[in-house]
Amino acid sequence: MPTALIVGASRGLGLAMVEEYLKREWSVIATARGPSKGLDALRESAGERLEVESLDIVEQDAVAALRKRLAGRTLDLLFVNAGVSNGHGDTVAGVSTDEFVRVMVTNTLSPMRVVEAFESLVPATGTIGVMSSGLGSVADNERGGWEVYRGSKAALNTLMRSFAARNKSDPRAMVIIAPGWVRTDMGGPQALLSIDESIPGVVTTLLAQAGKPGVRYLNYKGESVRW
Ligand SMILES: NC(=O)c1ccc[n+]([C@@H]2O[C@H](COP(=O)([O-])OP(=O)(O)OC[C@H]3O[C@@H](n4cnc5c(N)ncnc54)[C@H](OP(=O)(O)O)[C@@H]3O)[C@@H](O)[C@H]2O)c1
């Protein structure tokens, strides 16, 4: 049975990904930085197929400790979902340095540190993925808005491309996901998609990339997003 590590799975899209992989007969190691009623409920039905670990991705010691706990395991999917947003109207002119650093460290530096820490557990047939956003597309940024969040996801995309470029002969699939605008705490009630309209497509897209080397930026329908 294949195993996925899904990082940042307490609620929203991450929790839904855990549920979807369990439905598709995978074992899942899910991380949350605090208690999660959603993961507790899934654990009741999934039993040993779901392991829950504690992790705040910003804390380097915690990342190293989890890496140690998982030594010797095989991760057919390593996926970092955790992320934060800030205001639609926040511009670089108005944002505080602390807020800029919070968003960048959480959405850009920390996911890549998790990728770097755990990638050696992913076999040649495995997949390494991160949750980006359509807002991370530089080419599609014609309407503006969400400047700081956009910048953090565009930088995440670039760092994934750099990771792939540094590991040119790597046979593993590397996937940057744009899940669509989805009704979660972050997406808000006005978002276009329900979780059920996004996440099964995200998981199908990730599964379809296995065995295909190189890095791709794909939406929840499996379509390429412009860089
Ligand atoms: N919803 C959308 O429309 C949309 C669109 C494009 C991209 N995305 C991306 O999809 C991902 C999930 O978004 P969502 O809509 O499900 O948002 P959400 O409901 O706000 O959930 C965010 C998740 O990230 C976790 N997280 C945040 N900071 C973390 C940290 N430092 N360490 C570990 N976990 C952390 C949260 O954990 P806690 O419960 O502990 O806070 C929560 O599980 C994010 O990367 C987001 O940028 C979302």
Image: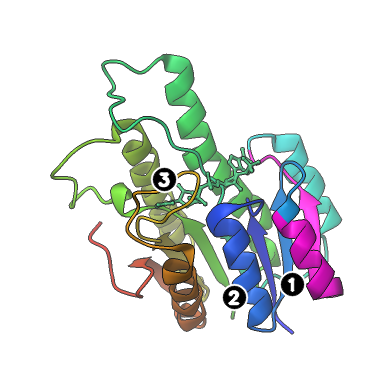
The local secondary structure at tag 3 comes to loop
Which coloring applies here?
A: rainbow
The local secondary structure at tag 2 comes to loop
Residue 6: percent from left, percent from top? 64, 60
The residue to which callout 3 is attached is 188
Q: Is residue 52 magenta?
A: yes
Taking depth in this image into account, of 37 and 199 the one nearest to the observer is 37
Residue 145: percent from left, percent from top? 24, 35
Q: Residues within 10 Å of mark 3 (few under 14, many from 20)?
A: few
Taking depth in this image into account, of 210 and 51 the one nearest to the observer is 51
Q: Quadrant of residue 73?
A: bottom right
The residue to which callout 2 is attached is 126
Tell me which segment is drawn in magenta: 38-57
Residue at x-position 51% and y-position 76%: 171
Residue at x-position 77% and y-position 45%: 35
The residue to which callout 1 is attached is 74
Q: Is residue 15 above or below residue 26?
A: above
* Mark 3: C-beta under 8 Å from nearest atom of ligand 1: yes
Q: Decide which of tag 2 and tag 1 comes sooner along the chain.
A: 1
Residue at x-position 68% and y-position 76%: 22
Relative to 62, is 171 on the left or the right?
left
Q: Decide which of tag 3 and tag 2 comes sooner along the chain.
A: 2
Q: Main secondary structure of the magenta part?
A: helix
